[in-house]
Image (cartoon, rainbow, N blue to C red):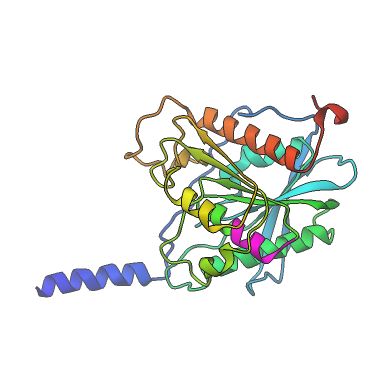
């Protein structure tokens, strides 16, 4: 009995400690783009922010056309639990090649003693949107074409960002999932304020955010009247991100590759955003 108590105490100390329990996986860049690229050459750069919205220095990674033509539609990609900008590198690069500015705030290391973790993610995303509109990121943003999005918990947090910032015009969800703790955030209070058009990209074989699970619950809770859903045949939850380190041995078998799923998700995201923002590629010479 005494030994059991020691083990329980050790586990609790580990969980409540300041160490990071969700490691950041190394980048896994594809040798070629999984999706069709636009006509623009792109640049990726980082902006350092001395006074982050959560009180600590932070940074933002920006993907944009190298020679932008006028104001750009923008997507702020909201971080999930310890997700890094390069987890969706191909999405960011592809959108930038088609004339989008993609704004990716840093994520904070997740610890179970940070009782404002999700609140901080949201505040940093909203700050990034403010700074982008103010012209602090070396590109001019079209304030009538603003989107937010994210993957897994980051996807759901993007909806909560949109609930608090009515400037957001559209939301993209990649396999949105719930959180067992929602530190610093009351989602139930915010869900009903989400009225923007939403796009759900889900995986048929996703066993973390199955199409008939949390994504359906989220659709029912939000007040969005325009909802589009696409379920990728044989898609897996972890194939929505590029790093392979976190892949689960318990995923069901799929004939779809990560490269193929990324291509489908990116192409559909770009075309849906184009539709929401009335962007005609024929007129722009992008095919």
Q: Quadrant of residue 120?
A: bottom right
Measured as percent of width and height from the top left, residue 169 is found at 73, 53
Residue 108 located left or right of residue 251: right
Of all residues shown, which one is farthest toward the left? Answer: 1
Measured as percent of width and height from the top left, residue 135 is found at 84, 58
Name the quarter where the C terminus is drawn.
top right
Measured as percent of width and height from the top left, residue 153 is found at 51, 55
Where is 162 relative to 172, above or below?
Answer: below
Residue 135 located left or right of residue 235: right
Where are the magenta residues, as a range?
158-166
Residue at 63% across, 50% down? 149
23 drawn magenta: no
Of all residues shown, which one is farthest toward the right? Answer: 70
Residue at 86% across, 41% down? 68
Residue at 90% across, 45% down? 70
159 drawn magenta: yes
Measured as percent of width and height from the top left, residue 190 is found at 58, 66
Residue 240 located left or right of residue 197: left
Q: Main secondary structure of the magenta part?
A: helix
Q: Quadrant of residue 269?
A: top right
Q: Tell me if residue 136 can be seen.
A: no
Name the quarter where the N terminus is drawn.
bottom left
Where is 165 relative to 230, above or below?
Answer: below
Name the residue nearer the viewer: 207 or 80: 207
Residue at 59% across, 30% down? 263
């Amino acid at each position: 009995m005494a030994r059991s108590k020691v083990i329980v105490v050790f586990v609790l100390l580990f969980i409540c400690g300041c160490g990071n329990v969700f490691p950041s996986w190394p980048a896994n860049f594809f040798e070629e783009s999984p999706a069709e690229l636009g006509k623009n050459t792109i640049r990726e750069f980082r902006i350092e922010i001395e006074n982050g919205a959560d009180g600590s220095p932070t940074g933002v990674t920006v993907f944009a056309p190298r020679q932008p033509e006028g104001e750009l539609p923008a997507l702020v990609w909201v971080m999930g639990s310890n997700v890094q900008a390069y987890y969706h590198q191909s999405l960011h690069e592809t959108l930038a090649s088609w004339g989008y500015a993609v704004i990716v705030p840093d994520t904070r290391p997740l610890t179970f003693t940070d009782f404002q973790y999700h609140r901080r993610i949201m505040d940093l995303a909203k700050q990034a949107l403010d700074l982008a509109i103010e012209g602090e990121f070396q590109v001019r943003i079209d304030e009538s074409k603003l989107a937010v999005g994210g993957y897994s918990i980051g996807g759901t947090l993007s909806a909560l960002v949109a609930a608090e910032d009515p400037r957001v015009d559209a939301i993209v969800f990649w396999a949105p999932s719930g959180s067992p703790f929602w530190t610093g955030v009351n989602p139930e209070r915010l869900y009903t304020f989400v009225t923007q058009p939403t796009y759900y990209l889900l995986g048929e074989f996703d066993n973390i955010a199955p199409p008939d699970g949390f994504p359906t619950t989220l659709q029912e809770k939000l007040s969005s009247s325009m909802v589009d859903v696409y379920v990728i045949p044989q898609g897996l939850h972890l194939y929505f991100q590029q790093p392979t380190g976190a892949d689960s041995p318990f995923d069901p078998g799929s004939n779809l590759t990560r490269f193929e799923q990324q291509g489908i998700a990116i192409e559909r995201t770009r075309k849906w955003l184009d539709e929401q923002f009335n962007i005609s590629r024929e007129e722009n010479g992008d095919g």
